[in-house]
Image (cartoon, rainbow, N blue to C red):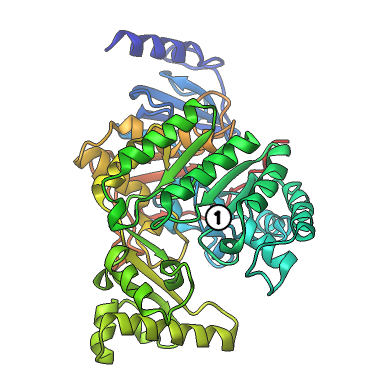
Amino acid sequence: MATIEKVVLLLALSSLTGCAQDESPVCRNDNGFLITDVSVLDGSGVPAIRADVRVTEGRIAALGLAGACEGEQIVDGGGHILAPGFIDTHSHADGDIDKVRDALSMVSQGITTVIVGQDGFSQYPLADFFAKLEASPSTVNFASYIGHNSLRREIMGENNKRVATAVEVAAMADMLRTELKSGALGLSTGLEYEPGIYSDTSEVIALAQVAADAGGRYISHVRSEDRWFEDAVDEIILIGRETGMPVQISHIKLAMVPLWGKAPQILAKLDAARADGVQITADIYPYEYWESTMMVLLPGRDYTDRAAVEEALDTIAPAAGIWMTRFKPHPEFVGKSIVEIANILETDPVTTFMQLAEMADKWQQEHGDSAEMIIGTSMKDADIRKLMLWPETNICSDGGLIDLHPRGAGSFPRVLGRYAREQQLMPLETAIYKMSGLAAAHMGFKDRGLIKEGMVADLVLFDPDTIIDRATPEHPDALSAGILSVWVGGELVYRNGATTDARPGKIIRAVE
């Protein structure tokens, strides 16, 4: 055993107070349990140590090696890995949590905390959403940002496809202050989506400053992930510099052919900003394809512009790599690529894209609801690997509880099984750090993300030799392998492929 590991273990042993270190323990732990025979990856990025972990009243009571207390429940870890519960810093679990309280697609990945209110869209009013979750909890913890797009829609109504006036920005700021008092982590933006796409930088900075003044944070689906990505990175750096608040790039990606291979340049820009005092970070999911709307490919929002459609299919997402995940006018098109639909319609892919967009637009105008969603293939694994390795990138899913993109059920085990174990991109302890300790730091959490005395007992037990994602585009809800048990607040919520009846999830509010 390495000297540093011996020191850590001896310190851990000394922390096991209240339980005698002999064959006849005299202590009691009636409100908890002891997890034995595990290798603990504590979420800090250091290598694993062999230890027992004592949980009492929902928190980590001690870490070390000891016999059980009198009457204490023993959980045999079977020699597997025990890690902090994973924190999904970009989740859309709020969309279906009222229908899927067990959050199976999340806990089956080892996720114990989800951060919602993403891409500029949040539940409104947030206090009501939190109250509903507290009245009828789920398996996982929830925290939320306040969405800029949601603020715009409430204040500007249908007349939101323009720059906001000073009066409207002031009204949004007042609304934001009210929402922040509900415990939101800060402000989120989705500047590639309507109506945020019509805002200017001064509006965003003004609102971000309100969140900063309240001690909040900023997270953003930046203004462009393709054509003007570098400009969009400059904008979020500016927001971080002007407000002094932590800023995070959501699901960082290089989603355009001319950007492929430029990860080193982008990361150099982020490093320079951090060296200059800007607290900029990022999260990422481990797939080469994204899920959004057809219109995200057309910044001008003009699906009749054939040249713009041709450019999008040539340089951003090829027609063969785009498939429908929602299409209300013709549900039979769901699961089919643009090329496959073109064959059905007996036309070319560009015309097909334009026709589908027109049908979706008409349906939405008639029904007042979103008509389409697509998955588009735009990234390269070589870039994903470099972006994931950046020391300030944590892991996220960008997934929902009911999701036709496999990221909703497979993101975290995919990183552990494919990137850490199979490809050896990073040590296992680094991957766990990016899912727990680093993610907690990026969200400002102080009492979770680490296996440490006093921390909330959000825990995941997994087999490092078998953990892997099994969700695919064809079977996006297939559960991952290798996650054995998950505890939230010390209560078992998942074991061997199924959720339990426990619903201990809490609301995590920003600390004032």
Residue 415 in the image, given as x and y percentages of width and height: 31, 44
Residue 299 in the image, given as x and y percentages of width and height: 47, 67
Amino acid residing under circle 1? Gln
**Residue 312 is drawn in which quadrant?**
bottom left
Number of marks in picture? 1
**Residue 266 is drawn in which quadrant?**
top left
Relative placement, left or right, of 348 versus 73 is: left
Residue found at the far bottom of this picture: 346
Residue 160 in the image, given as x and y percentages of width and height: 66, 69
Residue found at the far front of this picture: 307
Is residue 66 shown above or below 173? above
Relative placement, left or right, of 404 versus 173 is: left
Relative placement, left or right, of 391 versus 61 is: left
Is residue 467 shown above or below 275? below
Residue matched to label 1: 118
Residue 249 in the image, given as x and y percentages of width and height: 48, 45
Any part of residue 443 in sight:
no
Residue at the location (45% across, 27% down)? 53
Residue at the location (54% across, 23% down)? 453
Q: Is the C terminus in the top left, top right, bottom left or bottom right quadrant? A: top right
Residue at the location (43% across, 70% down)? 298
Of residues 454 and 337, which is closer to you in this image?
A: 337
Residue at the location (51% across, 30% down)? 72
- Mark 1 Cα shell of 10 Å, populated few (<14), some (14-19), many (≥20): many
Is residue 22 shown above or below 63? above
